[in-house]
Image (tube, helix red, strand yellow):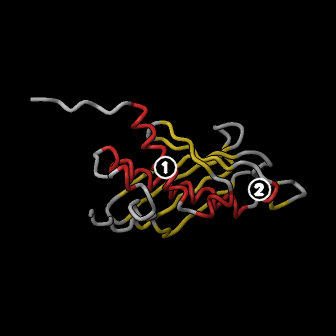
Amino acid sequence: MTRQKPEPVQVVKERRDKALRALVGGIPYAHFLGISFERRGDELTALLPFDGKLIGNPFLPALHGGVTSAFLELTSIIELSWSMLWEEMETNKLDPRKLDAEHLPRLPKTIDFTVDYLRSGLPRDAYARARVNRSGRRYASVHVEAWQDNRTRIFAQATGHFLIPARRKPE
């Protein structure tokens, strides 16, 4: 019995990075806010780079609450979508040549999203990580935390419930 030779690590890494770029690239608001994602294995960290347009209260100054909420919600949606996409990539169900909006999984729809503002977001870069608590065929629950300089001093956290879209039929 002949065993199939594994793909080179760089090829696998490039395919995963391309899939993540395509997933995030399908959300224009993420581009508007400047949100990007860094991947380490299957773990994602979202980055919201500081920009003056993100300030809500110029007297403090503090990040706008809507920007903070959007950052947390986008991080949750990308993490949930990435976890679905990761499974398809690792089981070779996703053709790497078809990494476009038409072939990527549809994004989950928000059922509800509760944000806890723990302290003011300062005028500097912010980071967030989400964790999928439960994911079934139709419903998922996600928790997300955001911090700035110190990972242990989160300035906002949220819990969201999402409707998982039906999977597209393979061609």
Residue at 47% from the left image edge and 63% from the top image edge: 161
Quadrant of the frame with the C terminus: bottom left
Query: Which amino acid is tagged 2?
Result: Leu
Quadrant of the frame with the N terminus: top left
Q: Is 64 left, or right, of 35 in this rendering?
A: right
> Residue 162 placed where, x, y %?
45, 65
> Residue 76 placed where, x, y %?
52, 56
Mark linked to residue 48: none
| Closer to us: 51 or 5 | 5
Q: Which residue is mark 2?
A: 63
User: Could you say which quadrant of the image residue 168 lies in?
Assistant: bottom left
User: Could you say which quadrant of the image residue 99 lies in?
Assistant: bottom left
Residue at 45% from the left image edge and 55% from the top image edge: 80
Residue closest to the far right: 59
> Residue 59 placed where, x, y %?
90, 57
Q: Which residue is mark 1?
A: 20
Q: Is 124 left, or right, of 153 in this rendering?
A: right
Answer few, some or many: residues within 10 Å of disc 2's Cα (few below 14, many 20 plus, some between 14 and 19).
many
Q: Are marks 2 and 1 in contact (CB under 8 Å)?
A: no
In the image, is residue 3 above or below residue 32? Answer: above
User: Could you say which quadrant of the image residue 52 lies in?
Assistant: bottom right
Answer few, some or many: residues within 10 Å of disc 1's Cα (few below 14, many 20 plus, some between 14 and 19).
many
| Closer to us: 147 or 27 | 27
Residue closest to the far front: 97
Give SS at disc 1: helix
